Image: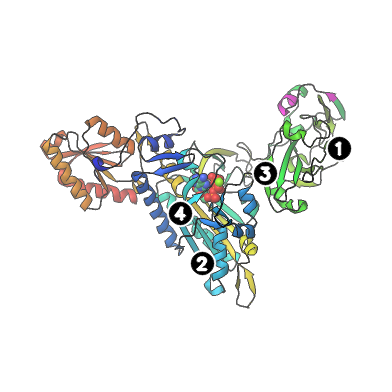
Amino acid sequence: MRLSQMLFVTLREDPAEAEIPSHKLLLRAGYMRRVASGVYAYLPLLWRVLGKVSEIVRQEMNATGAQECLLPQLQPAELWQESGRWETYTKAEGIMFALTDRRDQALGLGPTHEEVITAIARDMIRSYRQLPLHLYQIQTKFRDEIRPRFGLMRGREFIMKDGYSFHTDAESLKETYQDMYAAYSNILRRCGLAFRAVEADSGAIGGSGSTEFMVLADAGEDEVLYSEDGQYAANVEKAVSLPVDAVPSEFSEYQVLDTPNTPTIESLAQLLSCSPTQIVKNVLYVAGFDSGKQVPVLVTIRGDQDVNDVKLQNELTKLAADYGGTAVLSLEVPDAEAQAAWLAKPLPLGYISPGVGDDYLKAPNKDFVPKFLRLLDQTAVDLENFVTGSDQTGRHVVGATWGKQFTLPQRVVDVRKAAAGDRTLHDPNQVLQTARGIEIGHIFQLGSKYSQALGATYTNEAGQEIPLEMGCYGVGVSRLAQAAVEQSYDKNGIIWPVAIAPYQAIVVIPNLNAADQVAAAEQLYADLTAAGIETLLDDRNERAGVKFKDADLIGIPFRIVTGRSLKDGKVEVVKRATGEAEELALDAVVPTLQGWIAEALG
Ligand code: ATP
Ligand code: MG
């Protein structure tokens, strides 16, 4: 491709809309343009990158026996009603774009395809002889993200590979899951990315396991906790660990003490000169269920610990049936304004006890449940002589014990957030380390949630009808492309891994008025192209300095300059990643680059 004929516009300044390096660079180097919040035009250079990523994904998927297809983006509401996800995905914080057609039918733009594929399986799979089966597609997904940001990292329209597998039993599902683990590792390795596979939250779906593939980078939105020996790595949402031991309490006698201005654990521990591990903290949430019920939730946990909202949401989902629902639509720490609607009298915030009475609550409407759902985190169960609120502003109790001053809440749960510095379960001598990660892929053993909801069954050898076991597997193709930049750039621009670079080589003519430079460059461009090396020719009427800067900015792995050394029959060849330059005889250029590219593609 000749740069003079390409839509090629680079920016000198960092665009104001971009916060992280990869986002800035892709905009500056002319790879993409923002059209609306979270919506981008993929320009020709980026489209080539996305094509290469997709092709690697396709090859690795096909190698496992999965088959490519293309499912509709426009999906009827009925399918989502059957799975029970229409409300969750379109109300409150739901991320599905929903619309109504001219016949007044409700539709959604596909954020994911479990419903569609399960409906197809229901129609087409009859017998165990058809199983296992794995279908995948590479397609644009739509999600009305609450916080679209960082360019392609969190878009509202983005490219995903999603695959769904169907099985007779959990054993067979596990085999495909392991194949996917290997395929995803291959994809990321071939794309030139450093990554870590981590245990992930399976959310409300439960399922028997899920793994996320994280590209490690400071700009990552996820936190990964891992042990130094490499044996344990998990998303913080899922991570488990041993909390530090509680310091035995110095308070042996139950007392109510004046503790003015101590609404936080820190201020209280300071005033009483005690360890936060001796304090019992009570955190108020309001959960909104899909039945419409709003429930005040009181989580009681050891003072030095924080609540993991994902674990809490999972626990609440298990209790949804008690409130006539199946899912949690919202989980919030209510502000003063929200509280005012359902408080019968002001709550002594910061001084609440585990036994705070339900008489603080009233029901402003039939949906609000005026009774605390009380959950006790494991960390607070064994505490003795602890410190906690007194239900009076400015006062706390010390020396309290379960069963004496306070009834032990019945529902004991694990909702504590694991943190860097905690000891690991497999080896208490190891402590958890923390890193930021960009989630590129997620593989998931779904089980029969969707097949049961939609009635997708098969007949086994004994003639019985059984719900299909399912797995699902997603890779963010466009997110991966940007993550590669986030992992590989320098002050001059992008440094693409060879496997996904839009072009492998760029031939630069420093001076268009020098006939020998032009002739040599044209010949090299023709030879490289004929040899199957994807090559750009910078034949623009620009200063040499501008051309060198642009070549660095767009990150093409190998640059060939037809400059001064032509008089010796040589050209300069520069490797973008290392800046190494060498002079090669004209006829050595093609074989040398072929060698380098083969080596890089390994
Ligand atoms: P996240 O937690 O980052 O929102 P997710 O759990 O919603 O991701 P999945 O539903 O598992 O993601 O989707 C599969 C893959 O699609 C993700 O691993 C990610 O790489 C990509 N992806 C998800 N949401 C977006 C988005 N808004 N923009 C770009 N890529 C995305
Ligand atoms: Mg998401």
The answer to the question of whether label 2 and label 1 lie on touching residues, with beta carbons closer than 8 A, is no
Residue picked out by circle 3? 330
Query: How much space separates mark 3 and mark 4, taking CA atoms?
Result: 29 Å
Residue picked out by circle 4? 139
Residue picked out by circle 1? 359
Q: Is residue 140 visible?
A: yes
Q: Is mark 2 within 8 Å of ligand 1?
A: no
Q: Secondary structure at mark 4?
A: strand
Q: Which kind of residue does numbered mark 3 sit on?
A: Ser
Residue picked out by circle 2? 133
At 40% across and 46% down in the image, what residue appears?
192
Task: Mark 4 or mark 2: name the one nearer the start of the chain.
Answer: 2
- Magenta highlight range: 257-269
**Residue 271 lies in the magenta-colored region:** no
At 28% across and 47% down in the image, what residue appears?
596
Query: How much space separates mark 1 and mark 3, taking CA atoms?
Result: 24 Å
Q: Which kind of residue does numbered mark 2 sit on?
A: Leu
Residue 568 at what x, y percent from top left? 11, 37
